Amino acid sequence: MSSFPTARPRRLRRTPALRKLVRETTLSAGNLIAPLFVRHGKNVSKAIGSMPGQSQLSVDLVVREAEVLARAGVPAVLLFGIPSRKDLLGSENYDPDGIVPQAIRAIKAAVPDMLVISDMCFCEYTSHGHCGILNAPDEAGYTPQLEESYLLNDVTLELLGKASVVHAQAGADIIAPSGMLDGMVGAIRAALDAQHLEHVTIMSYAAKFASGFYGPFREAAEGAPQFGDRAQYQMDFGNSREAMKEVALDVAEGADMLMVKPAGAYLDIIQRIRDAYDLPLAAYQVSGEFSMIKAAAANGWIDECRVALESLTAIRRAGADMIITYFAKDAAGWLAGR
Ligand code: PBG
């Protein structure tokens, strides 16, 4: 390797055109997925205070937002539902007339090319806010097996399969299980295939960490645990070998795409998975990552557009093919020079 003064890396940084020519990582609207929060009602837009610029929208307004995103070049939306009722079984999640199936049908009817991803989890739908069925409450009809409150894995898998079929029959292109239950990908694949839904894609939240960065999302999805936290099912943030084990299991169970969540503090995990697997890889820039940028920008401490695009490009550089981000619409605009 030649060294200074022969080698002068600054030669490649002299003008904007040169820098553009030698940039190694690209970011475009086509890489982005927009999360949307859908609630019951008509013409309802309820601002989410912890996430400036984001709102819970009724189905009619979610459809309009999907149209705007499609025009901006964003190819996919990820749906979260705010149900009208919460119970021990999270039953609205597998109700064909539940809020998410309604939204899926409406979006696919109005914007057929928009990919609709259903975030498949029970935390928004259960009265206790955990991601599935708990062993404790006997009203749920399951015999308690353990002294302490524990998320029942295999009982929850049955309901995840049932709800995935309902969302897929409503027209979801992709089911994205996010509960970090053991065997969730295999159970959902089997349930879908048994109903001739073998064409429906599974994007697994393969390595999802129990993270403080989900803080602002509590208000957005109204699904905070009423007691305890999610550390019994989501991963410990100190672990990276364990992430590889989680990914290996999901790949073996038939995941079509993988995901790492959160993104910004987990770039090493993204890179490690990218190096080891060929499957498409998504990363989720979560609510805390978004709101920290928004809050600092609102104080005039950082430039929102600049930092948002830098953070998204860094996630791509680490190896993510696609990014789920609350900046999707704005980033598409910024990238188009609007
Ligand atoms: C629920 C779920 C959460 C998020 C997505 N799905 C919250 C959690 O796991 O506690 C967080 C998304 C975000 O913070 O933007 N399974």
Image: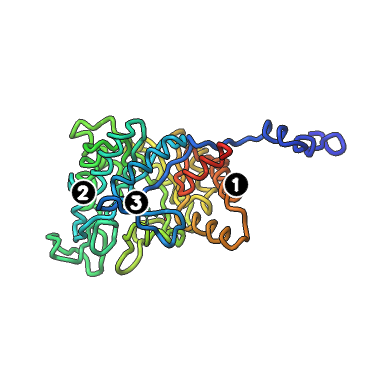
Q: Position of residue 302 (x, y in %)?
A: 62, 57
What element does badge 3 sit on? strand
Q: CA distance from mark 2 to mark 3?
A: 14 Å
Residue that carries the numbered disc 3 in the rendered image? 37
Quadrant where the N terminus is found in the figure? top right
Residue nearer the viewer, 45 or 145: 45
Q: CA distance from mark 1 to mark 2?
A: 38 Å
Q: Is residue 248 rendered to the left or right of residue 267?
A: left
Residue 257 versus residue 180 in the image, above or below: above
Amino acid under disc 2: Gly
Q: Residue at x 41, y 35 (%)?
A: 70
Q: Quadrant of ligand 1?
A: bottom left
Q: Are the residues flagged by discs 3 and 1 in contact, CB closer than 8 Å?
A: no
Residue that carries the numbered disc 2 in the rendered image? 98
Residue 20 versus residue 264 in the image, above or below: above
Amino acid under disc 3: Phe
The numbered mark, 3 or 1, whose residue comes first in the sequence reads 3
Residue nearer the viewer, 133 or 125: 125
Circle 3 packing at 10 Å, graded few (<14), some (14-19), many (20+), is many
Q: Position of residue 193 (x, y in %)?
A: 22, 33
What element does badge 2 sit on? loop
Circle 2 packing at 10 Å, graded few (<14), some (14-19), many (20+), is many
Residue nearer the viewer, 192 or 326: 326
What element does badge 1 sit on? helix
Q: Residue at x 56, y 40 (%)?
A: 338
Q: CA distance from mark 3 to mark 1?
A: 25 Å
Q: Position of residue 164 (x, y in %)?
A: 24, 42
Q: Residue at x 28, y 46 (%)?
A: 59
Q: Is residue 14 rendered to the left or right of residue 201?
A: right
Amino acid under disc 1: Glu
The numbered mark, 2 or 3, whose residue comes first in the sequence reads 3
